[in-house]
Amino acid sequence: MAEYMHREFLKPLNNAEFDRLHHPGAATPLSGIYRCQVCGHEAVSTRGHPLPPQTHHMHPNKAAIQWRLIVASNNP
Ligand SMILES: [Zn+2]
């Protein structure tokens, strides 16, 4: 689970982007921390670069990774 110490550096944002699931290797829509919907594994990815590939980590049942944005950086 992502962690933080100083809450003044984070703010809630109601944005549908946080509800979208992305395939491994898809272009990262917003820079930030992504969480695998299947197992909770986290990774950082930068906008425009590919999200981590299916080989990033394995699931016991071979289920595909599904990345979900959980913390977005400020994207100017
Ligand atoms: Zn996973």
Image (cartoon, rainbow, N blue to C red):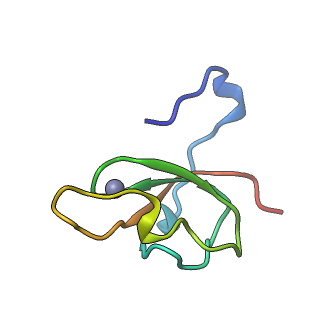
- Pick the residue in front: 63 or 21: 63
Quarter occupied by residue 51:
bottom right
Q: Is residue 11 visible?
A: yes
Which residue is drawn at the image coordinates 75% and 53% (left, top)? 74
Q: Position of residue 47 (x, y in %)?
A: 70, 69
- Pick the residue in front: 50 or 73: 50
Q: Establish if 43 lies above or below 53.
A: above
- Quadrant housing the C terminus: bottom right
Q: Is residue 20 visible?
A: no
Which residue is drawn at the image coordinates 43% and 35% (left, top)? 1
Which residue is drawn at the image coordinates 61% and 78% (left, top)? 27
- Pick the residue in front: 5 or 22: 22
Q: Position of residue 17 (x, y in %)?
A: 51, 67
Q: Position of residue 49 (x, y in %)?
A: 69, 72
Q: Is residue 18 left or right of residue 4?
A: left
Q: Is residue 9 left or right of residue 29?
A: right
What is the total number of numbered labels drawn onto the structure image?
0
Quarter occupied by residue 30:
bottom right
- Pick the residue in front: 48 or 8: 48
- Quadrant of the image where one finds ligand 1: bottom left
Q: Is residue 32 left or right of residue 37?
A: right
Q: Is residue 8 left or right of residue 38?
A: right
Q: Establish if 63 lies above or below 44.
A: below
Q: Position of residue 24 (x, y in %)?
A: 46, 73
